[in-house]
């Protein structure tokens, strides 16, 4: 079953987390960035990742985007291995072909929107569905228009990015990512490059996705108030591990670990 915007409204593999990191290791040379990380995200859950600079937050998202290989462990998406393939009952590292096939399960929005500058807002939203998913132009246009409406950009659909404000470009970037109907949406500091007066228009779109659509989301943010407002769970990262996690009221209201307390009092 799908809702109006086409997001799945039912858990496809009952009982399985939508995202699962199992003892994931990532190192750059001798620098260990993710240290035996275990992290599960349920279908429909919004999880925020907070923590000091360099604690591995963005690396978690990059590993899910399969932009780089992990050094140990396995990542599963929707119950199936992402970083690996099943072969004769064993897990072997994923081939490029396997990664390409799975990549569209994950949608990502970055701090810098990276819209295609020579394409209008609607063309940006149509490109992936036509080129990667094989939709007809008419289908992709319908889908794109629906999503631009969702992010409040329907009236600017024929504008090029250079004619749009940062907040407007970021909203188009969110619509473009959603047009691929990802199983998981990742947001990496999507408001950090924006002027303060337009941050609200982007956070409101994310708020709407949380309250009206059953999408699985992982968000890295420095905006503690926002994380507190919209997350089902907040994970505090320290040194490539989850130092503490819990519902936002608990983690922000009554942090148990000293490092969490120190971090939260420093960012307030
Ligand atoms: P955060 O998002 O919490 O600020 P990151 O996940 O971006 O942290 O980075 C974690 C650590 O990994 C940092 O020390 C960073 O310098 C290092 N790092 C990230 N990407 C690379 C890379 N491509 N090569 C070497 N070191 C990297």
Image: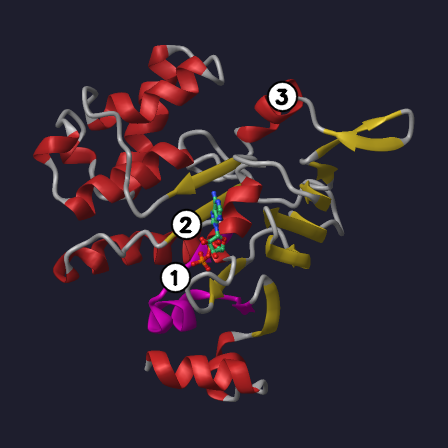
Q: Which residue is mark 1?
A: 221
Q: Which residues are magenta?
A: 216-238
Q: Position of residue 85 (x, y in %)?
A: 76, 29
Q: Which residue is mark 2?
A: 187
Does residue 193 show up magenta in the picture?
A: no
Say which of 83 and 175 sits in front.
Answer: 83
Q: Disc 2 vs disc 3: Cβ atoms closer than 8 Å?
A: no
* Label 1: element kind: loop
* Mark number displayed over residue 96: 3
Q: Quadrant of residue 235?
A: bottom right
Q: Disc 3 vs disc 1: Cβ atoms closer than 8 Å?
A: no
Q: Is residue 6 visible?
A: yes
Instruction: Give me the C-alpha separation between circle 3 and circle 1.
Output: 30 Å
Tell whether 168 sits left or right of 225. left
Image: 96 above or below 175: above
Circle 2 crowding by C-alpha within 10 Å: few under 14, some 14–19, many from 20:
many
Image: 205 above or below 50: above
Q: Disc 2 vs disc 1: Cβ atoms closer than 8 Å?
A: yes
């Amino acid at each position: 079953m799908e809702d109006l915007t086409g997001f799945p409204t039912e858990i496809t593999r009952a009982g399985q987390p939508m995202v699962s990191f199992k003892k994931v290791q990532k190192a750059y040379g001798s620098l260990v960035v993710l240290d035996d990380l275990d992290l599960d995200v349920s279908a429909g859950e919004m999880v925020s990742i907070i923590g000091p600079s360099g604690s591995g937050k963005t690396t978690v998202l990059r590993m899910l985007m399969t932009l780089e290989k992990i050094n140990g462990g396995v990542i599963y998406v929707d119950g199936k291995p992402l970083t690996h393939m099943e072969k004769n009952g064993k897990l072997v590292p994923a081939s490029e072909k396997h990664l390409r096939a799975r990549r569209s399960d994950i949608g990502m929005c970055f701090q810098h929107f990276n819209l295609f500058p020579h394409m209008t807002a609607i063309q940006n939203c149509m490109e992936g569905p036509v080129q990667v998913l094989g939709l007809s132009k008419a289908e992709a246009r319908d889908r794109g228009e629906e999503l631009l409406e969702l992010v409040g950009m329907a009236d600017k659909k024929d504008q090029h990015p250079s004619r749009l404000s940062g907040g407007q470009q970021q909203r188009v970037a969110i619509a473009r990512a959603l047009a691929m109907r990802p199983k998981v949406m990742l947001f990496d500091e999507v408001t950090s490059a924006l002027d303060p007066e337009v941050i609200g228009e982007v956070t409101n779109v994310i708020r709407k996705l949380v309250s009206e659509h059953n999408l699985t989301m992982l968000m890295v943010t420095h905006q503690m108030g926002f994380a507190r407002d919209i997350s089902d769970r907040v994970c505090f990262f320290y040194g490539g591990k989850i130092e503490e996690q819990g519902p936002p009221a608990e983690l922000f209201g009554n942090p148990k670990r000293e490092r969490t307390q120190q971090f939260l009092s420093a960012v307030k």
